[in-house]
Image: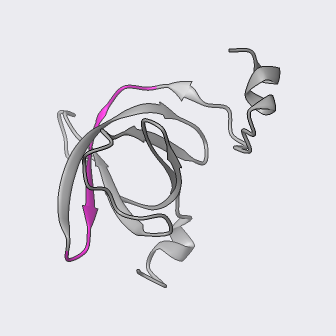
Amino acid sequence: MSESNKNDLGDKRSGTRTAFNAKVKITQDGLGEWFFHTRDISDTGIFVCVNEDHQFPGLGTKVKVQMQGLPISAPVLDMIVIRKGMDGYGLQFVPEEMSDSNDK
């Protein structure tokens, strides 16, 4: 799909997305952890593929995300669920200066 067609469909995301298939662990405090695969990544966030019958934290929820399958332990990043798509959810990186405050 061309860039102009994406904009015609109401695409409001500002970052250029790059296809990126990686296994990630998503943790929500007090509710558990889940494993999913990413579809793409940008400077502002990631898209996580989720089956429609699978439970996922709601929009506006802060979660912790860690890439899996690396030879060393990857950092755990704070992210916010900001968009629900037909095949998953868009998560936005939380700037480091904000990640320790206002936990949901």
Q: Is residue 96 above or below residue 47?
A: below
Residue nearer the viewer, 65 or 48: 48
Residue nearer the viewer, 21 or 6: 6
Is 12 on the left or on the right of 38, as rendered? right
Q: Quadrant of residue 17?
A: top right
Q: Quadrant of residue 7?
A: top right
Q: Looking at the image, can residue 75 be seen?
A: no
Residue nearer the viewer, 103 or 12: 12
Looking at the image, how many numbered discs can be counted on the residues? 0
Residue 21: in magenta span: yes
Q: Split into 4 quadrants, where in the image is the C terminus?
A: bottom left
Q: Where does the image place residue 48, in percent across and percent down from the top left?
A: 40, 41
Is 24 on the left or on the right of 102, as rendered? left
Q: Is residue 102 above or below residue 43?
A: below
Q: Where does the image place residue 42, in percent across and percent down from the top left?
A: 58, 38
Q: Where does the image place residue 25, in percent across and percent down from the top left?
A: 24, 49
Residue 60: in magenta span: no
Report the magenta residues as a range. Answer: 20-30
Q: Looking at the image, can residue 101 be seen?
A: yes
Q: Is residue 93 above or below residue 37?
A: below
Is 39 on the left or on the right of 76, as rendered? right
Q: Quadrant of residue 62?
A: bottom left
Tell me the residue at 67%/32% (across/down).
Answer: 16
Is 42 on the left or on the right of 19, as rendered? right
Tell me the residue at 20%/77% (across/down).
Answer: 30
Q: Where does the image place residue 95, in percent across and percent down from the top left?
A: 56, 64
